[in-house]
Amino acid sequence: QGQLVESGGGSVQAGGSLRLSCAASTYTHYYSSCITWFRQAPGKEREGVAAFDTFTVQTYYSDSVKGRLTFSQDAMKKTVHLQMNDLKTEDSAMYYCAARNTRCSSGPWSRQTDYDYWGQGTQVTVSS
């Protein structure tokens, strides 16, 4: 029913920028879904970073990234982009894209167990 493919990770210096992309071209529920980025740093639990409601285009951000990350969407390509600016060393982690076929507002967007589909992850490394 769907596959998510992340891209755009890489290595940057603190203060730099990256744009992550989550391609969901085969996800049948894309146009009424919540697409969320999670991240996991070594030795830490996976945490929710930001969520995008594909129908309402409403966005949600964790406090640690608010003001530095911005979503955009290419609806025709079923792709969500996450622009990450002013990156900090603490942003270094493996970033995962996940999707659920309910609105982001219909439950805690960072609750991982609600997500049906996950990508393989893309690494973000920020050096000082």
Image (cartoon, rainbow, N blue to C red):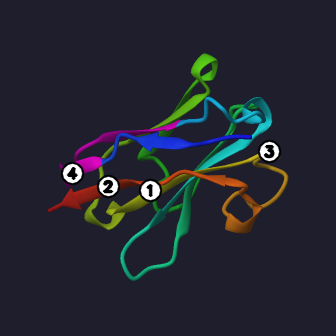
Q: Position of residue 95 (x, y in %)?
A: 44, 56
Q: Type of residue at label 4?
A: Ser
Specify the farthest residue to the top: 76
Q: Type of residue at label 2?
A: Val
Residue highlighted by disc 2: 124
Q: Is residue 5 magenta?
A: no
N-terminal label among 3 and 4: 4
N-terminal label among 4 and 2: 4
Q: Magenta segment, which residues?
A: 10-22
Is disc 3 surrounded by few (<14), some (14 to 19) or many (20+) residues within 10 Å? many
Residues at marks 1 and 2 touching, judged by CB atoms closer than 8 Å = yes
3D distance between C-alphas at marks 1 and 3? 20 Å
Our reading of the magenta stretch's main secondary structure is strand
Q: Is residue 14 magenta?
A: yes
Residues at marks 1 and 4 touching, judged by CB atoms closer than 8 Å = no
Residue highlighted by disc 4: 11
Residues at marks 1 and 3 touching, judged by CB atoms closer than 8 Å = no
Residue highlighted by disc 3: 101
Residue highlighted by disc 1: 95
**Kind of element beneath mark 2:** strand
Q: Type of residue at label 1?
A: Tyr
N-terminal label among 1 and 4: 4
- Quarter of the figure with the N terminus: top right
Q: Type of residue at label 3?
A: Asn
